[in-house]
Image (spheres, rainbow, N blue to C red):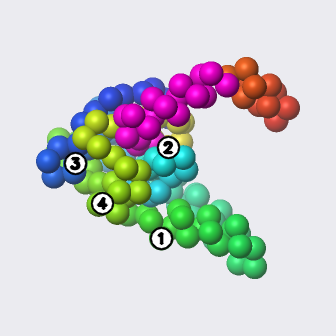
Amino acid sequence: MFIGEYQHTLDAKSRLAIPSKFRRELRDGAVITRGLDNCLFLFTRRQWDELAAKLATLPLSQANSRAFARLMLAGASEVELDAQGRILLPSFLRDYAKLSQNVVVAGLLTRLEIWDERTWKTYKGKAEQDSTDIAEHMGSLGV
């Protein structure tokens, strides 16, 4: 289970050190892809396989299904932790998420999200400001 928020920096070779508490779950391989809201999603291999199986069942006749599958699958890249617990972020994904040197790694149970630090602060500030409305909507979903 991934939870928590961690600030890290990209090194000169575009490697990101994964927080040590998450490394064990990622040691058997991981997949990184375009996320939503201008971040990157990092999945364990098992979680990725489950998501990919669901994406494979989406109807090809629906434009939104095709677009979402393309976003997730075409932008995916397998990554491995090096001996220091770092992953290499492909340039096209860094560009997509507009990552600067300072990034935030956020744990969201089944995945990690990788955000540019400024983008994260803006997003988080708005979510905190709208928390009452968000909570009311989640209540209607049974949360």
Specify whether 67 is left or right of 60.
left
Is the C-beta separation of discs 1 and 2 under 8 Å?
A: no
Q: Say which quadrant the C terminus sits in.
A: top right
Asked if one can make out residue 138 in the rendered structure from this viewpoint, the answer is yes
Out of 23 and 65, give the one closest to the viewer. 65
Amino acid type at circle 3 is Arg
Rounded to the nearest whole Å, what is the CA distance between mark 1 and mark 2? Answer: 18 Å
Please tell me which of labels 3 and 4 falls first in the chain.
Answer: 3
First in residue order: circle 1 vs circle 4: 1
Q: Quadrant of residue 75?
A: bottom left
Indicate left or right for 79 with 74 as reference.
Answer: left
Look at discs 3 and 2 and give the one toward the viewer.
3
Residue located 71% across and 73% down the image: 63
N-terminal of the pair, mark 4 or mark 2, is 4
Label 4 neighbour load within 10 Å: few <14, some 14-19, many 20+: some
Do tag 3 and tag 2 residues touch (Cβ < 8 Å)?
no
Name the amino acid, label 2. Arg
The amino acid sitting under disc 1 is Ala
Task: Please report whichever mark, 1 or 2, sits nearer to the chain's N-terminal start.
Answer: 1
Which region of the structure is painted magenta? Answer: 113-130
The residue where tag 2 is placed is 111
Mark 4 to mark 2: distance in Å? Answer: 18 Å
- Say which mark, if any, is on residue 74: 1
Secondary element at image label 4: loop
Q: Secondary structure at mark 1?
A: helix
The residue to which callout 3 is attached is: 15
* Quadrant position of residue 62: bottom right
